[in-house]
Image (tube, helix red, strand yellow):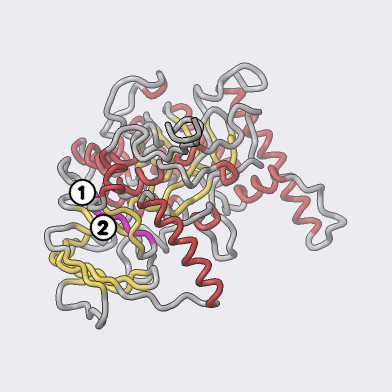
């Protein structure tokens, strides 16, 4: 049995035991001692200690300032670096699609219903240090549906992976796109102008639906007929669901900013290949950007002016910046390298570290729960064997909610970190073709 499969079964068994017992037992505290800590929301701590228990960070500090309880599981981390788990604002892990290849605007569809959490791509991402991901529908539509925010836990079902809000509802955004992708034959818009017009039309309808709901109050007889797409767009209008907007060219970026101003929705700009051309406008709008920096030529024409300098240009303009993989566009195992490329092109080291952790957490409304080594936050962190921006550095361990989900010292786990495409993929062999008695 593969290690990740063993952990899946162990997680399911633990959940069943918890349900039987009625309450989870107090977990043994775990401490990492001697590591260089990168808290992100504070200066680095040389020879530090991080203490976690019950899925939360209990304390961090320099050696001698953190009391390690008797019976704690103590890890010698001398020579290692510990930093928060990486947050990927834009991924396609799990093989799921939402409204892809259907009509151009489909806000009622959710990728939540299409993700396979047994997809071994999630183990690849763990080996790259990713602990939280915004899993998206595709970008071939003006509005291809709802995204979902996942913790890459080794548990059994997507319900156990999804990040939930204070009311227990699954968290996610709304995927939108403009530019070349959506310019196809009818019923798709064909032109940039028609694309923007269709978006305006659906948001005007959503505003009318919102007004009818408000007028009806608590009287179901006065409420409009239920419309799942309009309900999702009302969440967008009310700021409960963030728009994650694929856009590349500078004019397409400005179109998104206009629509955001007209309808008041919250938005994160994704890809923004030409962000460096309109950095001041992006910063003035107070809109964050999530960048992808590819290290090979090719791709679509509208992305021809993408440059490693974008992170530094946006940072100096005062705009918020994160990075994303768009996995498989960038392999999740190479996420740290993307930030290193941005530093090489002029972004500050501190800004690039934040762009992998705390800034993307904020773009998912999760900054109070993840993104920094702050006591009280979720115990999501990674252990590195060197500087995070060195090409020689490898992720040694990945922890989510205080549980280790990747260990490079384990040969099954290491396969996901070092193998090629398909490494570790499960394969079912039946008696018809395994060379056994069934033949």
Element at badge 2? strand
Q: Position of residue 141 (x, y in %)?
A: 57, 29
Q: Are marks 2 and 1 in contact (CB under 8 Å)?
A: yes
Q: Which residue is mark 2?
A: 83
Q: Position of residue 61 (x, y in %)?
A: 21, 71
Residue depicted at x 19% and y 45%: 389
Residue depicted at x 21% and y 35%: 345
- Which residues fall within the magenta stretch? 394-400
Q: Is residue 428 left or right of residue 113?
A: left
Q: Which residue is mark 1?
A: 388
For disc 2, the neighbor class at 10 Å (few under 14, some 14 to 19, many from 20) is many
**Is residue 396 located in the magenta-colored stretch of the structure?**
yes
Residue 122 vs residue 66, the one in the foreground: 122
For disc 1, the neighbor class at 10 Å (few under 14, some 14 to 19, many from 20) is many
Residue depicted at x 40% and y 18%: 301
Element at badge 1? loop
């Amino acid at each position: 049995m593969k290690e990740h499969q063993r952990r899946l079964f162990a997680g399911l068994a633990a959940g069943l035991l918890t349900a039987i017992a009625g309450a989870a037992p107090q977990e043994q505290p775990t401490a990492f001692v001697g590591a260089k800590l990168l808290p992100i929301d504070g200066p680095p701590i040389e020879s530090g200690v991080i203490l976690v228990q019950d899925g939360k960070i209990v304390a961090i500090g320099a050696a001698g300032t953190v009391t390690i309880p008797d019976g704690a599981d103590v890890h010698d981390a001398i020579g290692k670096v510990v930093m928060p788990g990486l947050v990927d604002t834009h991924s396609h892990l799990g093989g799921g699609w939402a409204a892809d290849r259907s009509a151009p605007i489909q806000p009622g569809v959710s990728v939540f219903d299409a993700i396979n959490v047994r997809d071994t791509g999630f183990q690849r991402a763990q080996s790259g240090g990713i602990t939280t991901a915004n899993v998206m529908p595709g970008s071939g539509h003006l509005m291809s549906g709802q995204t979902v925010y996942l913790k890459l836990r080794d548990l059994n079902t997507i319900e156990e992976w999804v990040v939930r809000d204070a009311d227990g509802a699954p968290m996610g955004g709304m995927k939108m796109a403009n530019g070349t992708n959506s310019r196809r034959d009818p019923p798709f818009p064909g032109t940039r102008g028609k694309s923007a017009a269709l978006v305006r039309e659906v948001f005007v309808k959503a505003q009318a639906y919102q007004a009818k709901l408000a007028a009806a109050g608590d009287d179901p007889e006065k409420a409009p007929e239920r419309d799942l797409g309009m309900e999702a767009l009302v969440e967008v209008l009310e700021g409960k669901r963030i728009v994650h907007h694929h856009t590349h060219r500078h004019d397409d970026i400005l179109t998104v900013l206009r629509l955001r101003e007209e309808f008041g929705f919250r938005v994160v700009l994704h890809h923004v290949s030409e962000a460096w051309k309109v950095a001041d406008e992006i910063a003035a709008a107070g809109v964050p950007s999530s960048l992808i920096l590819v290290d090979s030529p090719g791709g679509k024409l509208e992305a021809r002016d993408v440059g490693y300098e974008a992170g530094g240009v946006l940072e100096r303009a005062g705009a918020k910046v994160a990075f994303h993989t768009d996995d498989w566009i960038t392999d999740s195992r190479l996420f740290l390298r993307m930030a290193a490329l941005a530093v090489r092109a002029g972004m500050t080291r501190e800004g690039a570290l934040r762009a992998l952790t705390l800034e993307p957490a904020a773009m998912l409304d999760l900054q109070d729960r993840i993104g920094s080594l702050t006591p009280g936050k979720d115990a999501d962190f990674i252990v590195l064997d060197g500087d995070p921006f060195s090409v020689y550095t490898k992720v040694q361990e990945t922890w989510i909610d205080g549980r280790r989900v990747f260990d490079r010292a384990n040969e099954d786990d290491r396969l996901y970190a070092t193998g090629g495409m398909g490494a570790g993929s499960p394969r079912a062999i039946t008696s018809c073709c395994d060379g056994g008695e069934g033949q």
